[in-house]
Image (spheres, rainbow, N blue to C red):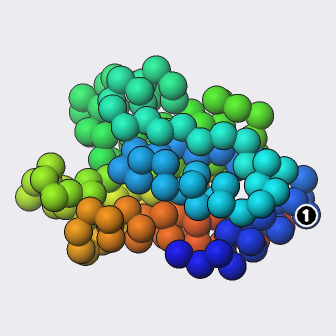
Amino acid sequence: MSDRLVERIAAALLARGEWLATAESCTGGLIAKLLTDLPGSSGWFERGLVTYSNLAKMELLGVPDAVLAEHGAVSDECARAMARGVLRAGPVDWGVAVTGIAGPGGGSDDKPVGTVWIAWSQRGHAPDTHRFFFEGGRDSVREQTAQAALEGLLYRIHEAA
């Protein structure tokens, strides 16, 4: 993970006077950790929610039970709901939500290990999602997810400028 990537996100958010929050499932807080490793992150990072269980997704982010029942936690619909929910959960301008299967178990034919949905949200806009298929072990999938989430966030912040 590039410290430079986090520095660039920080600079962009500070320049805009904007705040960020994360909602993480499969990464278990890794994205928030990487963001808060940078000194001064309290000036642009507001909070991180680890919503590992479906109950946490529903209670903390407002993910509808129907979304989880129909599409599952690892889905476009769930990632979108998480991204909307993290914006409701705090006074922030940007949200990043991740949900996936880091392995080694838990995969299926439809959703193999390494399947990850990432959603980026900006207040006042519909969330943007993307499905990824990462290879490697549990740690590798989590690290690749965090990298992709942060790269996607920086891209979207710059596009919004």
Q: Position of residue 77 (x, y in %)?
A: 39, 43
- Residue 80 visible in the snapshot: no
**Would residue 2 be found to the left or right of residue 39 on screen?**
left
Q: In the rendered view, would you say 102 is above or below 6?
A: above
- Residue at 58 percent of width and 52 percent of height: 32
Q: Note whether 48 is above or below 38 in the view shown.
A: above
Residue 146 falls left or right of residue 55: right
The residue carrying mark 1 is 15
* Residue at the image position 26 percent from the left and 62 percent from the top: 138
Q: Please tell me which residue is depicted at 58% across the width and 66% down the height of the picture.
A: 150
Out of 64 and 1, give the one closest to the viewer.
Answer: 1
Element carrying mark 1: helix
Q: Judge the density around disc 1: few (<14), some (14-19), many (≥20) Cα neighbours within 10 Å.
A: few
Amino acid bearing label 1: Ala
Q: Is residue 70 left or right of residue 152?
A: left
Residue at 77% from the left image edge and 34% from the top image edge: 91
Q: Quadrant of residue 153?
A: bottom right
**Residue at the extreme left of the image, as rendered:** 109
Q: Position of residue 126 (x, y in %)?
A: 61, 47
Residue 38: image x %, image y %?
Answer: 72, 63
Q: Position of residue 28 (x, y in %)?
A: 42, 47
Front residue (pair 94, 53): 53
Q: Quadrant of the C terminus?
A: bottom right
